[in-house]
Structures are given as C-alpha cells and as structure tokens.
Image (tube, coloured by chain):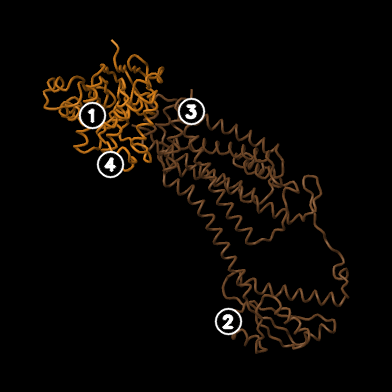
C-alpha cells in the first residue's frame, strides 16, 4: 500500500537541541490526520520536513511513495504547504496573490482561471479579493491562505496550525473549509494544532506528539476510550504524565 | 530550467513598485529633492545677482581732488548706486548708515590725488558692511575693489604711455595636452569643467547602489518575516529561479530609481553651473574628452556588474537575517565600504595614492564603477574592463553563496540579528 505520508524514525537536531526524536507515522490517502501537542513539541519541524523545506538528521519521509529528500521536486508537485501565521504579499491584491501562486501549478489559462475561481469560493472573500492584502484582517488573510493552499487540489495539503490566532467565527469557517474540501476532492490533509478540542472535531486520526516523539495515536474516539478521558486534552495530560 | 522566472519577476516588480516606502524614497524624492535643491540654489543666486544691481555704496571724499572725482565717476558709471556721504569721519558714517542698505563704504583719504600726481602710491579704504551672511553682501565690497583695481590699472597704463609690456613684462598663456594632443584651452578651466560635469557621477552611482541593496534586502527579509518565502519554497519552482527573480525584480526597480536620481541630479547640477556660469565655453568633444559610444558601453557594463554584485550581496546577507530591520541595518553597514572609495575618487587621482591604500581601494568591488566613470572620459578602457572582470568574479562568488543559502535549509534556520547572542535557530 502506498501511504500519502510515511515517516520512519525521523529525528532532527539543531545543534544540541533534539527537535524530533524517532518520530514515525503513516497517513492514509484521503484522511485528515492531525499532529497535536504543545508548543515546541516538534510539530512544525515534522511538517517542514514533509514539505521539503528542511532535511531530517536521520530517518525517512515519503509522500505517495516519493522520498522528500531525494525526490524533493517531485514531492513539491504533489503537496501544498501552509506555514503557521504566514502572511501574503502586502502590496498585491488577494486576486493577484492567488494568480501568482496558481501560475506555479496551472499550465494553461483555463486551469488558472478555475483555480482562482475555486479559491475565491473557498475563501468567501468575493469582492474583497480586489483589495490589497494589507487591508485584510487576520481572519480574512488566513482564509485567503487556506484557499490558496487548497485551490490547486493537491494530493496532500500540509497545514501548520491552520486556525492559530483566529477568533471563534473565523476558526469555525476555516475548519469548515478544510473538512468540506477534503471530502469533496479527496485531498489528504496533514495538519498540526495545539488546540486539541478543535482537532477532535476535524481529524479522522490524530497523533499526540511530545518532546519530538509520538506518545499516542488513533482516532479521537479510540484515544478517549483507551484513556477513559472526556476529551483529547485529558488524553494528552494522561500520556504526557501531567495528570 | 528557469520555468516560472517571469512570474516571479513580475510579482517582484509589482510588489516593490507599490511599496510606498520604495516609491517615495526611490522615485519621488530624487525627482523632487534635487530639482527643489536646484531651484532653491538658483533662486538665491538670482536674488543675490539682483541685489548687486541695486546695491548702494557710500563714499567719503576727504581728498576732493581730480583723481578722487575720477574714481567717483567710475563708481557711478557702474551698476552701483553711489552716495556721497556728508561726513568725513568714518566712525560717524558707520553709525549713520546702520539703517541704510549700503554694503560698502569707500574712503578716499586726503592727498589721494596729490600722491597720484607725484607718482607715489595712493590709498583707498574699502569698508565692507557686515549685516548677515548673504552672498550679495560679500559681493558688494568685492565689486568696489574690482572697480578700484581697474581704475589703478587705467592710471598705470596712462603713466607708462599705454605700454603694456612695462606693466606685465612676463605674461602666461595656459594651454593643455589631452591624450597626446596639444589643445589651446587653459588646463585649469578644462579640469574644473570636467570635474563639474563628472563629480556627480560617483554620487549618483553610490545612491543607486545603496538604494538597490536596501530594496533587495527588504524584499528578501520581509518574505522571510511574512513566511511567504517559506510558502514559495515548497512550490514546484526552482529555488535558483526564485533567487534570480528577486535579483531581476530589484534590478528593474533600482534602474528606474537610478534614472530618477540621475534626472534629478542632472537638473541640480544644471542649476548649479547655470547660476555660476564661470566656465568658459569649451566643447569637450573638440578636445577629445566627450564620452564616446564605447565609453558609454564600458561604463554601462561596469555599472551593471556592480549593481548585480550589490544585489547579490544584499540578498545573501538578508537571507540569513532575523528580520527586515536587521537586514536593513546590516546592509546599511556595508554602505560604508561604498562611501570610502567615493570620497577618494571624487577628490584624488587614485594612482597618486600610496600603494597599500591603492590596493585596498582596488580590492573593494564598488571602487571599479567609479573608476570606470573617470576612465570612460579619458578613454582608458583597459583598467575599466579589468575592473568589470574583477567585479564579475566577485558577483559569481557571492551569487553562488546566495544560491547555496537559498537551496539549503539555512535560509529558514539561520537568523542573524543585530543583538547580542548566538544566531537563533528554530525550536
């Protein structure tokens, strides 16, 4: 079986700091998989390795059978990455930003138009897409970026803290976008979050990550049942030895 | 290989050109600032010239002889308004003219005419009236002294029965040798003309290079800060293509900025020379000093490689900087190595400097476009071409370093900042 993402014994050292320590997980095609854990647990490092941005110190990662180190340019054609708290180009309009990004994936004008139209629909920004992104609120910017990440219908979308810093309404909207898009187009989603309650509602499967290694993995229901917990937050406290 | 380059360049230019800081700092300011400076200069000069015309001087005639009257007539025949003061006491006159607009008081002492008649030296006292620091004020007494000198020379010629050779037994005729040819133009006039025309070039080059470096540094560092770079690095586009796109975008905007700077500066220089109009009219082409097409090409090539070098350096620096402010500050420090050669080249001939200093200056890549500007005027292309090769080698090395940073994870993990402590790495 070809996994959407297969990470094997991944470790990453920054000098003497061990950001990842033997991390392994597998993501099936079409599922929404969440890496959850506190700040500094190694979520961003893991997602950056999957997205070909940084190299693992040891271990391997493959995306749909392609190695992220040796076949990085092939992997980049399959994925779409959304960094945590990313911005857009301040002096471009929302539409110009989407067009610029779409041009890297779209080969012809029809594809390009379709992608931008999709992004306009996903983001729900309609007329505001004409305005420069520096006039957008944090929530609008995040909706634009999530739409950008999904408009190309990638095989795998890697979303780092997709709702971080957003208010309840915008978080709700962004979660809706992700769930709808994954179901409609069969896009595999690998996301990270430190908000365990929201992940519970969004992800098919989750991995709890602490100090660079996975401490528990399963569907939210499985994990809650196994640890006799009311929610994932309690599960995490239990497995991390905080309870 | 460079698929997507056009897309990156168009985005860069659009993003940079719309940045109000760049638009105002690079295009609007040079286009307005230099002409405004020129306008201010020209206006103040015009006012000064006008005020000379309406300037008045006071004359205290203690002599009342024939020659005193002749001198008075010469003053009156000029543009000056001449007023004979009612007193013979200078101290009293100084008090009386406080409220007037007189810029000089001339005292013709008793015995003035007598001395001239007896072939003795006669004296005239010229008192400049000091009220402020205006140019017109300084030119008043000077105009009077010139008139007195002319009067003195007229008298001398009259005494030697118009025999000029007695007054000036040796006369000097100044000429020049340009590129091995004798040219009948005064050397000092020629060099001051060339200087006035080309002194602006190193300044313009420096302004352009510094602006270009700041643009490129800001562009890369803000992409890092906003994490747009992180996004684009995961797109199916070559990282070298992204680097080249940034470079090309900055070149385009810097070129427009440089053009605005040169246009503005040219206007300023025009105002400056027009106001003074001290240069004799010399046709530089006729003496072989006007730049030829080859000169322009060599200068253009030299400027281009220097610009590429500056941009590659700024991109390399800013790609490991913590944030926009750090990147701008670090690039700002590098501006220092641009100013030093500029000052040397503007005021001295580099070949006259001690060997060590000359080698140090020649080692700085930014020295070469400025030397090329001078070499192009004199038609000495060998040095300029060697400079182009030297800077090109540097550019390739810096570009290689920048590409290495861009194609590895260092671009995301290295965060050089202008504070104490080790470079921070992500957790």
Please tell me how crowded label 3 is: few (under 14), some (14-19), or many (20+) other residues with Cα within 10 Å: some
Q: Which residue is mark 3?
A: B404
Query: Could you tell me how far apart the alpha carbons at marks 3 and 4 are, in whole angstroms?
Result: 36 Å
At which x and y percent is residue A166? 23, 37
The chain whose colour is orange is: A
For this rendering, which residue is in front, A214 or B319? Answer: B319
Label 2 sits on a secondary structure element that is loop
Label 1 sits on a secondary structure element that is helix
- Determine contact: label 1, label 4, CB under 8 Å: no
Question: Measuring 65% from the left and 89% from the top, which residue is drawn there?
Answer: B86
Tell me: residue B91, above or below residue B221: below
Judging from the image, mark 1 belongs to the subunit labelled A
Query: Could you tell me how far apart the alpha carbons at marks 2 and 1 are, in whole angstroms?
Result: 84 Å
Q: Which residue is mark 1?
A: A177
The chain whose colour is brown is: B
Q: Are marks 2 and 1 on the same chain?
A: no
Q: Are marks 1 and 4 on the same chain?
A: yes
Q: Residue B373, can we see it?
A: yes
Please tell me how crowded label 2 is: few (under 14), some (14-19), or many (20+) other residues with Cα within 10 Å: few
Mark seen at residue A137: 4
């Amino acid at each position: 079986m070809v996994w959407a993402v297969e990470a094997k014994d991944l470790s990453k050292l920054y000098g003497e700091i061990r950001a990842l320590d033997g991390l392994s997980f597998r993501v099936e095609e079409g599922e929404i998989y969440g890496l959850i854990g506190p700040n500094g647990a190694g979520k961003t490092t893991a997602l950056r390795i999957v997205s070909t941005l940084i190299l693992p110190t040891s271990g391997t990662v493959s995306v749909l059978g392609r190695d992220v180190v040796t076949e990085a340019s092939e992997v980049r054609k399959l994925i779409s990455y959304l960094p945590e708290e990313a911005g857009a180009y301040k002096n471009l309009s929302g539409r110009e930003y989407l067009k610029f990004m779409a041009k890297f994936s779209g080969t012809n004008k029809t594809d390009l138009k379709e992608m931008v139209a999709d992004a306009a629909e996903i983001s729900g920004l309609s007329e505001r897409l004409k305005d420069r992104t520096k006039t957008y609120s944090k929530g609008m910017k995040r909706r634009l970026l999530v739409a950008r990440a999904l408009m190309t219908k990638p095989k795998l979308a890697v979303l780092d803290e997709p709702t971080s810093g957003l208010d309840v309404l915008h978080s709700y909207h962004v979660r809706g976008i992700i769930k709808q898009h994954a179901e409609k187009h069969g896009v595999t989603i690998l996301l990270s979050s430190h908000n365990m309650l929201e992940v519970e509602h969004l992800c098919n499967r989750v991995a709890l990550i602490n100090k660079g290694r996975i401490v528990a993995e399963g569907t939210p229901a499985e994990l809650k049942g196994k640890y006799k917990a009311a929610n994932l937050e309690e599960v995490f406290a239990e497995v991390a030895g905080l309870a | 290989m460079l698929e997507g380059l056009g897309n990156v360049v168009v985005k860069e230019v659009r993003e940079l050109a719309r940045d109000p800081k760049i638009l105002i700092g690079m295009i609007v300011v040079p286009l307005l600032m230099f002409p405004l400076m020129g306008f201010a200069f020209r206006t103040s000069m015009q006012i000064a010239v006008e005020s000379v015309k309406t300037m008045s001087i006071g004359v205290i005639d203690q002599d009342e002889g024939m020659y005193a009257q002749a001198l008075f007539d010469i003053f009156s025949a000029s543009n000056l308004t001449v007023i004979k003061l009612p007193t013979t006491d200078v101290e009293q006159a100084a008090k009386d003219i406080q409220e007037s607009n007189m810029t000089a008081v001339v005292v013709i002492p008793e015995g003035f005419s007598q001395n001239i008649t007896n072939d003795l030296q006669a004296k005239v006292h010229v008192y400049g009236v000091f009220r402020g620091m205006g140019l017109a004020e300084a030119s008043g007494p000077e105009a009077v002294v010139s008139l007195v000198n002319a009067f003195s020379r007229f008298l001398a010629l009259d005494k030697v029965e118009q025999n000029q050779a007695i007054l000036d037994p040796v006369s000097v005729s100044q000429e020049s040798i340009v590129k091995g040819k004798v040219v009948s133009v005064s050397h000092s006039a020629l060099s001051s003309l060339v200087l006035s025309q080309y002194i602006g070039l190193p300044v313009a080059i420096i302004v352009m290079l510094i602006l270009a470096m700041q643009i490129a540094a800001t562009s890369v560092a803000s992409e890092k800060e906003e994490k747009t770079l992180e996004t684009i690095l995961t797109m199916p586009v070559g990282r070298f293509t992204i680097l080249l796109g940034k470079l090309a975008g900055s070149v385009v905007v810097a070129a427009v900025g440089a053009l605005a700077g040169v246009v503005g500066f040219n206007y300023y220089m025009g105002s400056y020379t027009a106001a003074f109009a001290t240069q004799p009219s010399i046709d530089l082409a006729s003496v072989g000093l006007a730049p030829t097409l080859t000169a322009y090409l060599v200068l253009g090539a030299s400027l281009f490689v220097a610009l590429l070098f500056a941009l590659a350096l700024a991109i390399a620096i800013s790609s490991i900087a913590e944030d926009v402010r750090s990147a701008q500050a670090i690039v700002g420090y590098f501006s220092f190595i641009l100013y030093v050669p500029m000052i040397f080249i503007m005021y001295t001939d580099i070949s006259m400097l001690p060997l060590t200093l000359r080698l140090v200056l020649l080692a700085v890549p930014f020295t070469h476009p400025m030397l090329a500007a001078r070499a192009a005027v004199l038609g000495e292309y060998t040095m300029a071409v060697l400079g182009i090769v030297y800077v090109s080698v540097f550019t390739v090395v810096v570009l290689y370093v920048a590409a290495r940073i861009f194609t590895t994870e260092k671009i995301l993990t290295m965060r050089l900042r202008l504070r104490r402590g080790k470079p921070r790495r992500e957790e």
